[in-house]
Amino acid sequence: MEIPTIQKIKNPAIQVVVALVCFFLTLAGVMGLAYKIFNPDGWLVQALGLVWNLQLHYSLMAVPVLIAAIVLGKMLFTGFFNKMSGSIGNWLTITFMGLGLLFIVRLFFYGGV
C-alpha cells in the first residue's frame, strides 16, 4: 500500500496546512503517549509495581518474551528490516498521528487523556 505524500498536492498553501496538521497530530501523539507513560499513575508506575509484586512462576513466563526479543534484535541488526526501512518511519509517523487524534478526541469529549 502506497502512502500518499504531501508533494502530490499541487497547491502550496494546502501543502503547508496539511504539513502543519500532520505535525501537530504527531506532536499530540508523542505528548499524549509520554503523559500516559510518565504520569504519577501512569503505565510505567503500574508496570514497575507489577514487576515488584510478581512471584517466581510469573517471571518464568518472561523467558519466551526474552527469546522473541533476542530474535527480533538479531533480525534488526542483520539487516532483515532494511527492505522496509523507508516505510517503517512512515508507519511510525502515521501511528503517532492516530494516537494524537485519539488523545485530542478523548481530551475534548472526556476532559482528559
Image (spheres, grey):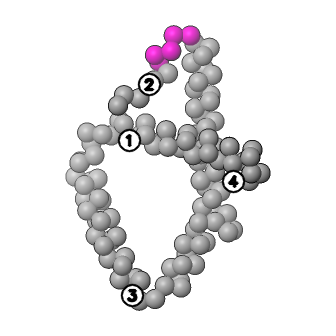
Helix, strand or loop for disc 3 = helix
Amino acid type shown at disc 2: Pro
Observer-nearest of 109 and 16: 109
Q: Give the range drawn in magenta.
A: 7-11
Helix, strand or loop for disc 1 = helix
Task: Give the mark nearer the N terminus: 3 vs 2.
Answer: 2
Cα distance between the residues tagged 3 and 1:
36 Å
Residue 61 screen position, x and y as percent: 36, 79
Label 3: how many Cα within 10 Å (few below 14, some 14–19, many 20+) = few
Residue at the extreme front of the image, as rendered:
109
Q: Is residue 8 magenta?
A: yes
Task: Give the mark nearer the N terminus: 1 vs 4.
Answer: 1
* Main SS class of the magenta portion in the image: loop
Cα distance between the residues tagged 3 and 2:
48 Å
Residue 41 screen position, x and y as percent: 67, 69
* Residue 5 quadrant: top left
Amino acid type shown at disc 1: Ile
Helix, strand or loop for disc 2 = loop
Q: Which mark is residue 4?
A: 2
Instruction: Assess whether mark 4 and mark 1 are in contact (beta carbons under 8 angstroms).
Output: no
Q: Is residue 27 visible?
A: no
Label 1: how many Cα within 10 Å (few below 14, some 14–19, many 20+) = few
Residue topped by disc 3 = 57
Instruction: Assess whether mark 2 and mark 4 are in contact (beta carbons under 8 angstroms).
Output: no
Residue topped by disc 1 = 88
Task: Give the mark nearer the N terminus: 3 vs 1.
Answer: 3
Residue topped by disc 4 = 113
Instruction: Assess whether mark 1 and mark 3 are in contact (beta carbons under 8 angstroms).
Output: no
Cα distance between the residues tagged 2 and 1:
15 Å
Residue 7 screen position, x and y as percent: 47, 18
